[in-house]
Amino acid sequence: MMRSATTRATAYALLSSASPSASSAAFVVGSAISSNNNDVIINKGNNNKNLLGKSATSDGHNKALLHSSAVRTTKTSCRMFSSSTDSNSSSSSRGLAAVDLLPVYLSDARAVQTYHPVDAPNGALQLSVAENKMLEDILVPALSKFVTIDTDNDGISSFQNDLIYYQPTHGRLGLRQAMAGYLERILKLPTELDQEGLVLGAGCNAVLENLCFCLAEQGDSVLIPTPYYAAFEFDLVARAGLNIVPVNTMDFQMDKFPTDDDSIPSHAYYPNKLSLNAAYEAAKSAGSKPKILLLSHPNNPLGVSYPASVVKECIDWCRENQVHLLSDEIYAGSIHGTKNQEGDIFQSAIALGSNPNSSEEGLGLGPYVHFVYGLAKDFALSGLRVGVAYSENMSIRQPMQKVNDLCQISSQTQLTVERMLKSPSNTIDIDSSAKKNDESMDFFTDKFLNESNTRIRSRCDRLQNCLDDTGIPYLDADSGLFVWMDLREFLPNKGGDIVSGKETEESKNKRERELYLDLLNQHGLLFTPGRSMKNEVPGFFRCVFTAASDEEFDLGLQRILKFVTQRRK
């Protein structure tokens, strides 16, 4: 039973083949969030208010956080969306609940004045949004070429005749072929992908939601190792109606990797069978079926890739427990560190979970290992909205294609990306100091990613050197666009918020929020607070070092130095 597509996904596939109106109705019913489920694992909305100092409950392990999923439906909250108090013209409760799922720090970021060299020189520097703004000089000229085609002596045209019509719901054949070839290269896959298992949709979050929609029923649980990308709660709860169970790891790892001080090494964040078992049992105790383990690999926000042994342990655990492993590898092309003891820093879950000797077409993953990716991070193309899901579970293939009907990529964007992925390395000149004459770089994408990672590493080194100079602990980043910083030294005192020898969750949230607002309002530094990503310990922040211009980044380093100097007086 657990190998099959969910009933709502199957219903959608059947109804969508009958009529457009029927398919729309099936989606609405299937994705509605229950309004009377009071035993959700992570409350649908309330958990994100923790940063405001609201209370939370936890026993320090993976025990489910039991909160009411009740949604604010007062006239005051409704007026945020409508000038009328007529209930028929107000937002639905589930619409308000979706807004409530967004992390509080996003509201803070929107409310503060951002930096401008002339108009707001003391404004806050945006170092919390995971975008790479260091590549415009390469991307804009390249995309200008990819978006056009030469016609027979008739000049330049950006359209082909077939682009104006409906496209295959899971993506144009040319793009699926190009994407398969690209993924096989960067993921170093042992065999070719089954191209019919690829589904291309409007962004990684869209295909992630669709995949989870097809794998789990409303109210089922998704296990996610902490800390995790805060928007997962919106992506998987708002419409899919899933519950999120944090996989807290530190109590199951720290005794294996003791340190001489109170530093927290990268190993402390690795999931293992013990922590996964604890989260699994917590979900069951709360009355929710554990269906998915979602890995962010390379990890956001930690800026490191899980070792191959950790990923293999997760794959084995999932297969043993008939839980679907879903590996979000949106940073797979942004690996900028050096090799470790296990070889390559990053090894894809679908490479590690493959069986080249399988008689099945594709990688031989079986029904429980899945993958999502997108172009928003590695190629800094967040505005193009290109995501891809891959699965060899045959029972969800048709449901995935039909659900993707609601988030297809425009035909013109598909063609542009297809050209980009297929173009040879000499399509556009990239002045890279590293591997300029490397003959192995046959494609534009290979050359581009090499240059991108050279720039990322340079920025990362500058930030980490600044942190070294100021004595701020951090995880040595090897992947992604960010560094995980330990600012616990600057937290306010705990005060009297201690129960049974442990600091309360409310106290942790309150103290970190005070530090976060001080960094933002007094020092103009907008970082992502760790508690918004369910970090177990307060005082950790994610710094996205690629989100700023060269001038802004230089200023950011100066402000970090000034902050530390002032606080240590």
Image (cartoon, grey):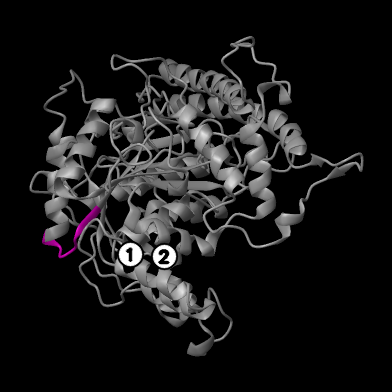
CA separation in Å, label 2 and label 1: 8 Å
Secondary structure state at the residue bearing disc 1: loop
- Residue furthest to the right: 154
In this orientation, which residue lies closer to the viewer: 65 or 492?
65
Q: Which residue is mark 1?
A: 44
Whether the residues at callouts 2 and 1 have beta carbons within 8 Å, the answer is yes
Residue 437 falls inside the magenta stretch: no
Residue 160 visible in rendering: yes
Give neighbour class at mark 1: few <14, some 14-19, many 20+ (Cα, 10 Å): many
- Residue furthest to the left: 500
Residue 169 falls in which quadrant of the image? bottom right
The residue located at (54%, 75%) in the rendering is 81
The residue range painted magenta reads 285-291
The residue located at (48%, 48%) in the rendering is 204
Q: Which residue is mark 2?
A: 100
Question: Where residue 111 sits: x, y (%)?
Answer: 56, 55
